[in-house]
Amino acid sequence: MQIVPGAEPWSADGNDVGILLLHGFTGSPASMRPWGERMAAEGWTVRVPRLPGHGTTWQDMNTTTWEDWYHEVDAAFTDLRGRCSSVFVMGLSMGGTLTLRLAEQHGSQIAGIVLVNASVHTERWDRHLLPFLQRIVASFPGISNDIAKPGQDEVAYSKIPLKAAHSLSGLWAEVKGDISRVSQPLLLFRSAVDHVVEPSNAAYILEHVSSTDKQEVVLADSFHVATLDYDAEVIVGDSIEFVRRLSA
């Protein structure tokens, strides 16, 4: 399957501090690459994988599940663990969900996690119909490019593949079931205006993780894809300080 230009995975080899950056549902590495390039400029080893079914066609994504996406990020994490003495995992939206799952599964092997508008549930009215709808409807209108800053493109699908969306709900259930196992230092970014992920997601995460070192930063000038928005510099700067503090 041909990859859409701009949706390719990206990596950089550096020192023994590893950074794993995970994009969101229907998105692509394009949403994380500028952040990754800045982390690589610090001399760190960076991986920005493309999740299975992403960056090609939405129909392709409908053939994948959350287990496929998690397998990819777990493999990337294992690669970094083999190269680096400390590894940090950072995710946007569903990438944040996968970050939480990695934290639940790998414990102290992860030095710290950074979440940007991470999701663990949805308040959409049609969520209760999804188990039925995904059997008879292939897709819904998309949720991509929720960005306040003009001229930005996360290279995402224009439709929501419903089979994949139903699988995402399964990932949310797994993450919520084990969320007390998340004890790593946590830096959480939340956009004040987000048309995709509701504020209750951040509230739930902060309330239920076991992390004692945790901080919430509210992004005043960005929508959902904050990594490409007006507050991208805040995310980059704070995450660099976070990694420096914990890897010193």
Image (tube, rainbow, N blue to C red):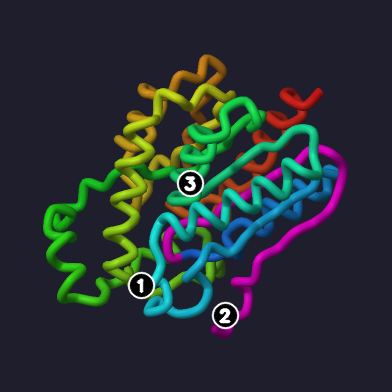
Q: Which of labels 2 and 3 is toward the front?
A: 3
Give me the C-alpha separation between circle 2 and circle 3.
Answer: 23 Å
Instruction: Find disc 2 in the rendering and name its residue.
Output: 4
Mark 2 Cα shell of 10 Å, populated few (<14), some (14-19), many (≥20): some
| Highlighted magenta segment, given as a residue range | 1-26
Query: Who is closer to the viewer here, 223 or 5?
Result: 5
Q: Which image quadrant: the C terminus?
A: top right
Residue 140 is covered by the magenta coloring: no
Q: Which image quadrant: the N terminus?
A: bottom right
> Who comes first in sequence, dot 1 or dot 3?
1
Instruction: Find disc 1 in the rendering and name its residue.
Output: 62
Helix, strand or loop at label 1? It is loop
Q: Is residue 148 visible?
A: no
**Residue 127 in the image: x percent, y percent?**
18, 54
**Residue 7 in the image: x percent, y percent?**
60, 71
**Residue 41 in the image: x percent, y percent?**
83, 49
Helix, strand or loop at label 3? It is helix
Give me the C-alpha separation between circle 1 and circle 3.
Answer: 18 Å
Q: Residue at x 57, y 52 (%)?
A: 73
What amino acid is found at the position of numbered circle 2 in the picture? Val
> Magenta part mainly helix, strand or loop?
loop
Q: Residue at x 47, y 40 (%)?
A: 101
What amino acid is found at the position of numbered circle 3 in the picture? Leu
Give me the C-alpha separation between circle 1 and circle 2.
Answer: 17 Å
> Who comes first in sequence, dot 2 or dot 3?
2
**Residue 80 in the image: x percent, y percent?**
73, 46
Q: Which of labels 1 and 2 is toward the front?
A: 1
Figure label count: 3
Instruction: Find disc 3 in the rendering and name its residue.
Output: 98
Helix, strand or loop at label 2? It is loop
